[in-house]
Image (tube, helix red, strand yellow):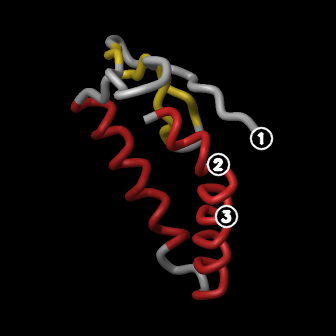
């Protein structure tokens, strides 16, 4: 499995481009370009999270555990690639 940087933020299931980017300065490996998170984008993400809480916050413990375990499994599966990106 490979991970490709998009240069965008994932907000409420949509990839959102920012106006500015910055270049990482890793100790080793290639540098990467990342989008800058502006206050407006953070506000958009926070509002989307608040809306999502309406359904997720009242879902069953089993459903929440399943989602969190799925996220953890994906992080484990991509661990080496995530570490490389840093």
Residue 80 versus residue 46: which sits nearer the camera? 80
User: Residues under labels 1 and 2: Cα distance?
Assistant: 7 Å
Q: Residue furthest left?
A: 39
Image coordinates for residue 31, horizontal then vertical, percent: 43, 18
Residue 81: x percent and y percent? 60, 40
Numbered label attached to residue 73: 3
Mark 2, other Cα within 10 Å: few <14 / some 14–19 / many ≥20: some
Counting residues from the N terminus, which is met first, the one under dot 3 or under dot 1?
Answer: 1
Q: Does 46 sit left or right of 62 as displayed? A: left
Looking at this view, name the residue that lies furthest to the front. 28
* Residue 70 sits above or below residue 4 on the image: below
Question: Tag 1: Cα neighbours inside 10 Å, few (<14), some, or many (≥20)?
Answer: few
| Pointer 2 residue | 78
Q: In the rendered structure, which disc, 2 or 3, sits on the residue that comes first in sequence?
A: 3
* Residue at the image position 60 percent from the left and 65 percent from the top: 72
- The reply to whether discs 2 and 3 touch (Cβ–Cβ < 8 Å) is no
Label 1: state its secondary structure: loop
- First of labels 1, 2 by sequence position: 1
Rendered-image quadrant of the C terminus? top left
Residue drawn at 60 percent across, 46 percent down: 80
User: Do residues under tags 1 and 2 come within 8 Å of each other at their CB atoms?
Assistant: yes
Kindly identify the residue that appears in the image at 45 percent across and 19 percent down: 32
Q: Residue 1 carries which label?
A: 1
Image quarter of the N terminus: top right
Q: Quadrant of residue 14?
A: top right
Query: Between residues 30 and 44, which one lies in front from this camera angle?
Result: 30
């Amino acid at each position: 499995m490979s991970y490709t940087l998009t240069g965008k933020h994932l907000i409420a299931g949509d990839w959102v481009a920012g106006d500015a980017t910055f270049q990482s300065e890793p100790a080793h490996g290639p540098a990467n370009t990342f989008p800058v998170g502006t206050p407006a984008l953070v506000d958009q993400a926070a509002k989307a999270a608040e809306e999502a809480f309406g359904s997720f916050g009242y879902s069953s413990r089993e459903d929440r555990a399943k989602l969190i375990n799925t996220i953890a499994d994906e992080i484990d599966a991509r661990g080496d690639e995530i570490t490389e990106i840093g």
